[in-house]
């Protein structure tokens, strides 16, 4: 059994990956709330986590469930407003921001999640399949289809 890191070190080590996944799955607006909820839930469960567990996969699984919660809550709540609020203007991560968030949001849910969990979180397809359901081959296919669509989108827009 491997010694576990202090929880603060877990947050420091895996926080950026979890936030990237939350942004990819939910978009900028809800990502930080899902990130916070992920680590609050993880803080409660961390003492019971085996020392040899894959902490990153465990956190991405929690983030996936929190993203589902956020999506369900948003679907249940209607907020009428007189004026449409302005979109948040998050600074791009670097000068090459090609509106990846919008392109990911346009993908079907399984493709978006497979791309986020495999390419952004670095999880193997077996773990991606465990999170989103289905087989590792289905997760690989969903990720490949998502990447192919993103390539076509960018080729058409910037080709």
Image: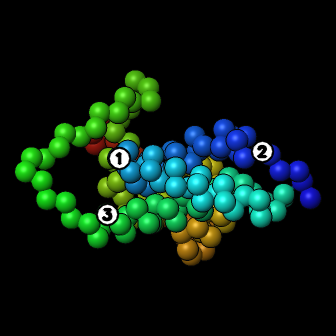
N-term-proximal mark, 1 vs 3: 1
Is residue 115 among what the camera can see?
no
Measured along the vertical axis of the image, is residue 98 above or below residue 120? above
Q: Nearer the viewer, residue 52 or 11?
A: 11
Q: Earlier in the sequence, mark 2 or mark 3?
A: 2
Quadrant of the rendered image containing residue 6: top right
Q: Residue at x 72, y 54 (%)?
A: 55
Where is residue 13 drawn, in percent x and y?
68, 40
In this figure, which residue is indicated by the disc labeled 3? Answer: 74
**What residue did someone put label 1 on?**
29
Q: Secondary structure at mark 3?
A: helix
Percent from the top left, x then y, of residue 126? 66, 66
Give the farthest residue toward the right. Answer: 1
Asked whether residue 16 appears in the rendered view, the answer is yes
Which disc number belongs to residue 12?
none
Which of pointers 1 and 2 indicates the residue nearer the eye?
2
Residue at image coords 62%, 70%: 130
Residue carrying label 2: 6
Left or right relative to 18: residue 149: left
């Amino acid at each position: 059994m491997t010694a576990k890191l202090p929880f603060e070190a877990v947050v420091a080590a895996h926080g950026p990956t979890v936030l990237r996944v939350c942004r990819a799955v939910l978009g900028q607006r809800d990502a930080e709330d899902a990130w916070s909820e992920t680590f609050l839930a993880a803080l409660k469960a961390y003492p019971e986590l085996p020392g040899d567990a894959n902490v990153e996969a465990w956190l991405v699984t929690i983030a996936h469930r929190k993203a589902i919660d956020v999506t369900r809550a948003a679907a249940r709540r209607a907020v009428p407003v007189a004026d449409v609020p302005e979109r948040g203007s998050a600074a791009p991560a670097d000068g090459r921001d090609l509106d990846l968030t919008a392109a990911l949001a346009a993908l079907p849910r399984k493709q978006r999640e497979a791309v986020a969990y495999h390419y952004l979180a670095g999880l193997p397809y077996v773990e991606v399949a465990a999170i989103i359901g289905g087989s590792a081959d289905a997760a690989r296919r969903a990720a490949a289809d998502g990447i192919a669509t993103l390539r076509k989108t960018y080729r058409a827009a910037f080709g």
